[in-house]
Each structure stands twice: as C-alpha cells, then as structure tokens.
Amino acid sequence: MARPEQRLGLLSWGLLAKCFLGSGLLLTPLASANVLQEGGERFSPVRSSGGMVASQEAEASRVGRDILRRGGNAVDAAVATSFALAVTLPQAGNIGGGGFLVLWRPDTATAGAPLLEGETRVGRGRAVTINFREKAPLAARADLFLAADGSVDRLKATRSLLSTGVPGTVAGLVLAQRRYGRLPLAAVIAPAIALARDGIVVSPELAASLKAAAPRLKADPTSAQLFFKPDGLAYAPGDRLRQPLLAATLGRIAREGEAGFYAGPVANQLVALMREQGGLISAADLRAYRARAMTPLIGDWRGHAVIAMPPPSSGGVTLIQLLRILEGFDLAAMGLNSAASLHVMVEAMNLAYLDRNALLGDPRFVAMPLEELLSPAYASRQRARIQPNRHVPSQQLSPRAPGLPEGPNTTHLSVIDRDGSLVATTTTLNFSYGNGVSVPGAGFLLNNEMDDFTSKPGVPNAFGLVQGEANAIAPGKQPLSSMAPTLVLDPRGGPLLATGSPGGSRIITIVLQVLLNRLEHGLNLASAVATSRIHSQLWPDQLSHEQGLSPDTLRLLQNLGHQLQPSRAMGSAHSVEALPEGGSLGVADPRRSGSLAIGE
C-alpha cells in the first residue's frame, strides 16, 4: 500500500490533470519536449574549465581563484583563501583559532614520490589530513570552569581568556603549504596582507555582524579599536575597514613561517595579554605547538570512497558511522526528505551521537574503539536498534539531562585545481568572534575553544552536547570537535567532491545530508546543498528542521513520536565537484549571504 504522502501525491496529480483536461490545456508532446529549455533542477552549480574555490566570503574566494590562475595548486589556493578570510571574515576566519584540512592528490600530481607521514593511498591517488586544532595550555586543569558550588561558570568558559586554547591555524596552514604547495609562502599570503593593509569594503553582512557583536567586542578595548571607528560608531556598508596591525602580523608569518607567530613580537604580545588578564597560554605553550599530518579515515558509500578527519575531530568517525548504518536502507526508494527517510536518519543520528559524546576524544589521551565503531558488524547491530514505526526516546538510549540551544559557527572552504587535487578545510574561533578579545599590537581575535572540552560530565556545552570523561580538560590536550571537512572519490578512484560546513554540533549531519542528496538521491551539487536540512544529536530529544519540509511530512514525523523544532538555516556547506570530462563545479551555500564559488 502506498504511504500517506504517496497517496496524497497521486491524488494531487490526479486533480491537477483533471484541471488541465477540463480547461482544455492538454499536455501535448510539444510541451514535454522542453522547448523552453528549462533545467531539470531549480538550482545550478557554477561551472569552470579549470579549478574552483568556494568559501564564505567573496573577496577571499577571489584571492584563491587568483592563486590558481598564477599557477598555484589546490593547497596554495586553500591556504591563501584561509589567510584572506582572517581579514575579510573576522567573525570566523582567523589566525587565532584552529581547524582541520583534508587533502587528496591524484597520482599524476605526486610523480611517484614516496608516501609522507600521514599519507595513505586511496583510489588513484593519496590522501592526508592536517590537524591544527587548538590545545589546552599546560597550566589547564579539569576543573578549570567549575564554580565554587560545582556548577559550570559559562562566562568563564566562553568569555574569559581562560577559554582560549593555544591557536593552531598558522601552524596548520604553513605546514600544509610547505609540504604540498607549489608557490612561495610569501606569494600565498601576500593578497591577505594587501587586504588588511589597504582595507576591505565593509559588506552589509559584515556591518550587521559587527553591530550584533558590538556589546561583546566593545567590552575589550583592543577589539573596540580594531572593529569600530575612533568615535565608537559602527562601520556601515561601503565603509573601508583597514587592519594595519593584522597586516604586520601576516607579514611576519609570510617572512618567517610559523616562527613569525609562535615566537618573536607576536608571541610576546599574546603572552603579555595572558599575564595581564589572567589567561593561561605561556611562551612554552606557543613554542611547543605543532600541527600534525595524520592518516585520514576512509569510509564508503556504495562504491564511493569517503575521506574524513580522524579524532580529535569527531566528524569523520560519526559521519562514517552514519553512512554505514544508513547504507542498509533504500533511502532513494523512500524518497528525498520523506517522513520514512528522515525518520531512519534521525534515529541513526541519535545512535551515532551517543557514541560520539561518550567515547571520542584526543587519541593521544584517550583509547577509543575505532575499529569496532567503524565496523560493518557494529553498524548492523546499530541498524537493528532502529524501530521503523516509532521514535526511540533519548532517555531510553542515554539517561542524561537535555542540553542548551545550539551555538554559533566556524567557516569552511573547498577547493579543486585543474589537476584534480581536492582540499576541504574548516577553521574556527568557536563562537563568532571567539571570546571577543583581541591581542594588543597584533590585530587578531582569540578563540574560546576550551568550551569544547567537557567542563563537567553530563552538563551540556554551548552547542547542547552532553559529553563524558573522554573529552575532559587536560594539559596539552585537544578538545573534541564536530568539524567535518570531507572528500569523496568516484567509483573509479578519481576525484569527485569536497564539502564541509560550519554549524557547531550540526556540522556532521549537514555534511551527511549533502553527501546523501548528491550520491543517493542523485541531485546536482547545487540542489544537494540547497535542499532543506534536519538535525538530531540525542540531547535535546528533538528533531530540528529548516523551512521547506511539507506539513504532511512533519505530521507523519510527529505521529512517529518525534518532537519537532523549527530551526534557522543550518550551516553553510560550500562545495566543489570534479567533472569527468575535466573542469569543475562549485556551489556557495545560499544560507549565508556574501559567499562565492568562483572558477579559475
């Protein structure tokens, strides 16, 4: 028997046909021949005969495009775009935060060179990840954010300098460019220096963002000087924002590499701020920081290799778990965003987040059963727990208190070059503008990533995640992250797509849906990104959904026991795709204005 929404669809189409026939408007062979040359889908990606860059901010995307045109490769373009985002997107782009990068290069680009540390062969090429997640300072302790009564001090965990982890962005970008870039580092950073020195035209998006963050930014004298006019007024759209101190810092990095940030004047300025305002980061912390090349996790979706970040990102583990559970369902037959498909996706999400929150952490500190978690046998057992006709309440899976609302975001960019190399990189300050504190004399904001640790087991962080001891604070440890930069190969082992997103704890499920929309439901890349999204993370026990799902589908989900929660737009999954005949496609997620996908 057809499902209710199917019967409704048949009825609606039947009535529509009768209306056409009754009015004499027959559907003739001429009409079905598409003489208007209309596309099959409502959204279309950008096309290029060469490479492609897709990021959250248009000027930064143009920087990456220009690097490709000057002979740079995908890594050069990704690094140049990332440094430019530190200038043009201060709420998320950064040099005071951290992130992850995933790279795949075809055999034609490696010339038979031996595998480097962290590299592994995948398909017709090799993959590697760069971990430049922030670290807890050596003086950090497990009870760092606990008040005298044992509760979590949210202001201390998110607004103070105690919330700042040792930044990793500069070390990670420099490592990636030194190992895999084609151009000199100075040439790659030069566009960002020029943007900071000469100024950027304030966009409506940046003006609105700065205005919204004004109370927090103005609470810090340095941030107030950097991001507001001398009279304290906000920058308006069309004004020019110059950042000469940031330009000087970027210049030191361009000349000296990571030493220009982790030693010398910039390091001294950062350490002095910490001493003056009660932060923990020391000169020893900065000297000891190292970005690491790590072997990626490799998953599969119906013959497509999925290349993802290992811990301390939870993104790769949880994404591959979800794919393994869901591959046992015929989602395509269920229908895109039908109640049946969304139900099994939500139930799988809750099971995967249960493991994420309880078991995952920094692999240097925590033993994790990754082989078991990612095994087909475990996925089969998890799949068997999904009830087709009812939602399993979170309390039955994990008796933990519900969490807080979702929090702010990160920024993601994707790049492909004309040789087929793919890069996906996600960077973050955690909250928009981090903790709102900037380094005097250096011109950049600091992260509040320490809140991504478990401040107290069972108590939610700012993204509503209820986590366990595996992610507790410890000196030198990296907090668990939801960032999920992801690459996919085609069934022949060649490049297919790069994607990722901001969105806090929703990042993993956003990436999942982009992949399923493209690979399972057959949408083009633009439609795969634009389609309405849902999210569930065990706690709070609710199904968050964007606008665009039909009322009938929502009623069916409610009848299955789901608590529905309308959501603002989820994430911003800027993505690129390789064309089999050469060239590329790109999509800037329309959920956030100001973004751009631009071809070489």
Image: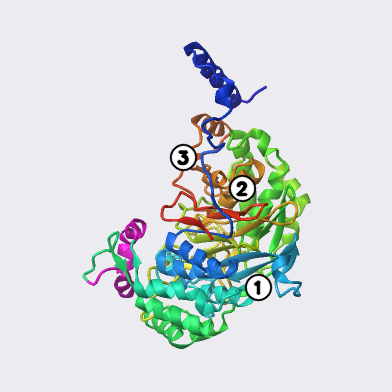
Disc 3 target residue: 547
Residue pictured at 32% horizontal, 75% vertical = 222
**Residue 154 at what x, y percent from top left?**
42, 63
Quadrant assignment, res 244? bottom left
**Residue 263 at what x, y percent from top left?**
49, 86
Q: Amino acid at mark 1?
A: Ala
Tell me which numbered mark, 2 or 3, is placed earlier along the sequence: 2
Foreground: disc 2 or disc 3: 3
Which residue, as the protein is rendered here, is positioned at the far top? 22
In the image, is residue 396 above or below residue 428? Answer: above
Disc 1 target residue: 293
- Real-space Cα separation, disc 2 to disc 3, in angstroms: 20 Å
Question: Which residues lie in the magenta part?
Answer: 203-230
Tell me which numbered mark, 3 or 1, is placed earlier along the sequence: 1
Tell me which numbered mark, 1 or 2, is placed earlier along the sequence: 1
**Residue 103 at what x, y percent from top left?**
64, 65
